[in-house]
Amino acid sequence: MENFFIQNGDMVIRLILAMALGMLIGVERVLVHKEAGMKTHALVSMGASLFIIISELIGVKYISAFGGGAFNPVIIAGSVISGIGFLCAGMIIFQKSRVMGLTTAGGLWVSAGIGMAAGFGLLGIAVVSTILTLFIFIVFAIIEKPIRKISDENPDILGGRE
């Protein structure tokens, strides 16, 4: 087992980082009482990373065994994006003439991107993306509150609701 971690240390670090970064985004979602929290974001991010690592390993295997041919490991990355889109669509609900869950769905979508970046070994961009995502969730929420209050008090502002 020790050999496994020595031989695959880079991939293990990628998975752990993807999981941790997704979890950080999930912590913010838990703090604001949203549907998808730490576990969901961590799983989406780590899962995306896992699929990217698998696509790299399969790519190396097929390219060395068959000289490349028609195999394109990037197709797996595209499939991850489609699958996450399906999961995110399930988070969005229309209730009492309001759309709910868009930000949570966006957070899951970004978590998948962060996991994909970690999976490809782009650890710096994964960390920066996590920081920017948390900035959006936390700072924009603070900025948005007074704007929403003004909008609620003046529904016709800037052409508002009809």
Image (tube, rainbow, N blue to C red):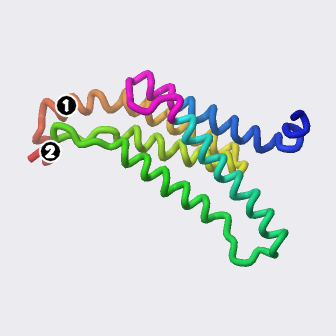
Q: Kindly give the residue lying farthest to the top in the view shown.
A: 31
Name the amino acid type tagged 2: Gly
Taking the spot 71% from the left edge, 51% from the top edge, the residue there is: 53
Where does label 1 land, which residue? 150
Q: Quadrant of residue 128?
A: top right
Is 39 covered by the magenta stretch?
yes
Numbered marks: total: 2
Note whether 45 is above or below 57 in the view shown.
above
Residue 12 lies, in percent from the top left, at: 76, 39
Amino acid type shown at disc 1: Ile
Sequence-first tag of 2 and 1: 1
| The one of 152 and 29 positioned closer to us in this rendering | 29
Q: Residue at 21% of width from left, 28% of height from top? A: 149
In magenta segment, residue 92: no
| Structural crowding at the residue carrying mark 1, measured as other residues with C-alpha within 10 Å and reported as few (<14), some (14–19) or many (≥20) | few
Q: Residue at x 57, y 30 (%)?
A: 23
Mark 2 residue element? loop
The vertical placement of 80 against 148, above or below, is: below
Q: Locate residue 99, reporting x and y percent.
A: 25, 42
Write down the residue under mark 2. 160
Q: Is residue 39 left or right of residue 8?
A: left
**Most distant residue in the front direction:** 1
Left or right: 117 with respect to 80?
Answer: right
Q: Quadrant of the N terminus?
A: top right
| Few, some or many residues within 10 Å of mark 2 (<14, 14–19, 20+) | few
From the image, give the main secondary structure of the stretch colored magenta.
Answer: helix
Q: Which portion, as a residue range, is magenta?
A: 26-40
